[in-house]
Amino acid sequence: MLDFVRIPKERMKILREDKKLIEQLENLSDSKVELNEEVSIESEDPLKRLRIKEVIKAFGRGFDFDDALNLLDEDFYLEIIDIKEFTGKSRVRTITLKGRIIGTGGKTKKLIEKISDVKISIYGKTIAIIGRYDNIKIAKKSIEMLLLGRMHSTVYRFLEKSMVR
């Protein structure tokens, strides 16, 4: 069976230039992946196809390829938050909200990643999270709190209370 995924051109360019990435994905998943206008995935196993699709989608949302490969593990999930849901069409507001998530010198993003044990990518008009289900819930809640205008200190306290052990 065949499936397709669209990713941004600049991310597709990286895959085209570094053939080892696709070879690695094919070897790990025992499938066939081709790059045309979009990424085509061929595998007999529908669950495997879905997992590969998530890996490509995560890479397209700005994750390192190695981080995206975690999605081949069935314990890991990808969550994508559309910033436009919190900003409307305002470009300036989108930039401001992305800055709130990143924090000064990347402090806020790193803290959310560390405490909730997830990986976060802020790319275009989306914020993507890779991690285990319960950890993603904590990270997503803290990101949404920031997007809704909560103070950073409030979000930090929320994170401390929900520390993943």
Image: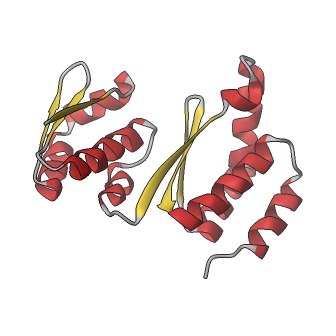
Residue 154, position in %: x, y?
A: 88, 60
Whether residue 23 sits left or right of residue 155 in the image: it is left
Residue 48, position in %: x, y?
A: 22, 51
* Residue 95 in view (yes/no): no
**Residue with the most extreme bottom position:** 165
Identify which residue is drawn at 40% across, 66% down: 75
Q: Is 98 in front, or is 107?
A: 98
Identify which residue is drawn at 71% across, 17% down: 89
Whether residue 7 sits left or right of residue 161 in the image: it is left
Q: With respect to residue 158, does 119 lie above or below?
A: above
Whether residue 51 sits left or right of residue 164 in the image: it is left
Q: How many marks?
A: 0
Quarter of the rendering occupied by the C terminus:
bottom right
* Residue 84 in view (yes/no): yes
Q: How is the image coloured?
A: secondary structure
Quarter of the rendering occupied by the N terminus:
top left
Q: Is 102 in front, or is 80?
A: 80
Whether residue 75 sits left or right of residue 79 in the image: it is left
Residue 94, position in %: x, y?
A: 71, 28
Identify which residue is drawn at 77% across, 73% down: 160
Residue 85, position in %: x, y?
A: 70, 29
Identify which residue is drawn at 65% across, 70% down: 115
